[in-house]
Amino acid sequence: MAASPVDGIVVAVAQVGARVGDIEANLALASRYARRAVERGADLILFPECFLQGYALSRSVLDLAQPVVGPAVRALAGIAEEWRIAIVAGVVEANPAHPHRPYNAAVVIGRRGGLIGAYRKTHLFDREAEAFTAGDDYPVFDVPLREGRPPLRVGVCICYDVEFPEVPRLLAIDGAQLIAVPSADMEPYRAQQAANLMSRAIENNVHVALANTVDRRSAATFFGGSGVAAPDGGLVSAGYLRPRLVTATLSDAAVEASGGAGSSLRERRLETFGRLLED
């Protein structure tokens, strides 16, 4: 039987609390978790939202923004190359057009250290709209993982994005086999995150991996709840309120059990959806 598109691919989710404002410490954390993920057989590891600088809306952190071809991402690419693992990680990306409003972005790096691309968060939550510039595109990236196999098609959305069903749906339409969600979700939104993680997988016939920050601060508790959801309803969870690395093996059988790749897309009645485009 021919090799299936996703069978045997191992995805790791790093539920960690980045040190806010300390890129070097966060790169060291990335290296430790990448090594542990490889030891568990992972092909790709996902880190949380704004991981390289740490998630915060303070000016001191936003001013640490760098271009995706800058030194922080190059160092992260070096970690990917060293451990031969693909990486998806959140980064505060410099915005030359608006230097005081960077992008809330995520980079996709191949296992040989090449920068495959970047996604910019399109839906900014609450005060994020004052801190960041919103993106306006939904790319899907071809990520080579193993010799002799076709690349895994990875779509990325960030935290609040996943609450809008249209965002993962657009990624699925463009052929995403895995949707990666770097996140910095906080109390009291546990139920919403759990529901979105599972729903986006089932309704799009794809696997969804979510890496949430875990951190207790005076004004917010980032609760974790990270995991990998399969389209047949299976879930590998990292639990809550503590750092943890979990891995999940993607399964073509889970895709088939959900109706098969693209089944939810084929059965849509687009002629009835016109009102979705109305303001």
Image (tube, helix red, strand yellow):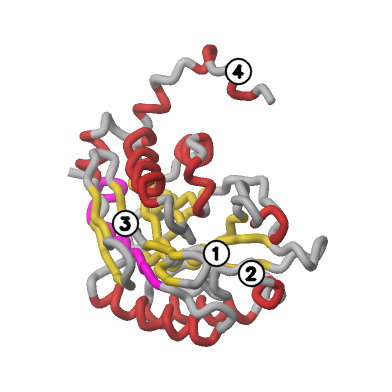
Q: Residue at x 62, y 51 (%)?
A: 126
Give how far apart the Cα atoms at labels 3 and 4 are.
34 Å
Depth-wise, is mark 3 or mark 2 nearer the camera? 3
Q: Residue at x 26, y 52 (%)?
A: 250
- Is residue 261 within the magenta segment? no
- Check if mark 2's residue and mark 1's residue have beta carbons within 8 Å: yes
Say whether disc 3 or disc 4 marks the residue closer to the N-terminus. Answer: 3
Give how far apart the Cα atoms at labels 3 and 2 are.
26 Å
Say whether disc 2 or disc 1 marks the residue closer to the N-terminus. Answer: 2
- Is residue 9 within the magenta segment? yes
Residue highlighted by disc 3: 227
Tell me how many marks there are.
4
* Mark 2: amino acid: Val
Say whether disc 1 or disc 4 marks the residue closer to the N-terminus. Answer: 1
What secondary structure is marked by label 4?
helix
Count residues near mark 3 (Cα–Cα under 10 Å), then give few for <14, some for 14-19, many for 20+: many
Count residues near mark 1 (Cα–Cα under 10 Å), then give few for <14, some for 14-19, many for 20+: many
Depth-wise, is mark 3 or mark 1 nearer the camera? 3
In the image, which disc is placed on residue 107?
1
In the image, which disc is placed on residue 68?
2
* Quadrant in which the C terminus appears: top right
